[in-house]
Image: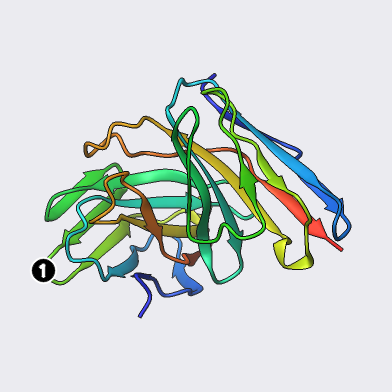
Amino acid sequence: EAQVTQNPRYLITVTGKKLTVTCSQNMNHEYMSWYRQDPGLGLRQIYYSMNVEVTDKGDVPEGYKVSRKEKRNFPLILESPSPNQTSLYFCASRDSDSTPGANVLTFGAGSRLTVL
Amino acid sequence: QKEVEQNSGPLSVPEGAIASLNCTYSDRGSQSFFWYRQYSGKSPELIMSIYSNGDKEDGRFTAQLNKASQYVSLLIRDSQPSDSATYLCAVNKERDSNYQLIWGAGTKLIIKP
């Protein structure tokens, strides 16, 4: 089954304790992206990656890091989490073809993070 | 002005009626428009995509695009309780060669039995 898998799905942590949210896709997609979703604000992009070893900042990158060492994996790293990073996080992927019809994202199930 | 605006709702519609969801965008050069449905606590899933002015129909769903007025809408005919969800509008950034999307905050739709 074609899918994007995120782990953990739920996490409660404390301020300053480094954590990693993993994301893996089995569709051979070149493009992957991380979003956070907060009430009333919709989806905001954190980082994205057009291909292996190519990453770029989205709209809200502060406090986050990513890496793309393999095509299928795109982990999100919070080096020193703070309470304002409490949110629902989604990983998504798609083909890199930018023609209309190709720009359709497949989302992971989401990771709900609480930072105390 | 937000780049993609949606009425947050909730929009309450009787079962069997037509639900009309609207979205306006600011980037006049945008070319791709998407409607995603998101159930509470779940991930967004694509409902409709539209790229040309006019209407596009898929089952009970119709997407309407008017580039001159910079709005895109989603009509849901014969609304069912299972249509109750938040509907997200997404629009591509014109000047972004990587084809990034801008997202609206979503409209919460409630279908009343």
The residue located at (51%, 59%) in the rendering is A44
Disc 1 packing (10 Å; few <14; some 14–19; many ≥20): few
The image position of residue B49, as x and y in percent, is 28, 46
User: How many tags in the picture?
Assistant: 1
Q: Is residue B19 visible?
A: yes
Q: Nearer the viewer, residue A22 or B72?
A: A22
Amino acid on which disc 1 is placed: Ala
| Horizontal side, residue B39 vs residue A105: left or right | right
The residue located at (86%, 61%) in the rendering is A15
Q: Which residue is mark 1?
A: B68
| Horizontal side, residue B47 vs residue A73: left or right | left
The residue located at (48%, 27%) in the rendering is A52
Q: The C terminus of chain A appears in which quarter of the rendering?
A: bottom right
Q: Residue furthest front?
A: A53
The image position of residue A18, as x and y in percent, is 82, 48
Q: Chain of mark 1?
A: B
The image position of residue B62, as x and y in percent, is 26, 52
Q: Is residue B111 visible?
A: no
Looking at the image, residue B3 lies above or below residue B96: below
Q: The N terminus of chain A appears in which quarter of the rendering?
A: top right
The image position of residue A31, as x and y in percent, is 43, 34
Q: Residue furthest bottom?
A: B1
| Horizontal side, residue A110 vs residue B90: left or right | right
Q: Nearer the viewer, residue B69 or B93?
A: B93
Colour scheme of the rendered structure: rainbow
| Horizontal side, residue A14 vs residue B13: left or right | right
Say what secondary structure mark 1 lies in: loop
Q: Nearer the viewer, residue A45 or A38?
A: A45
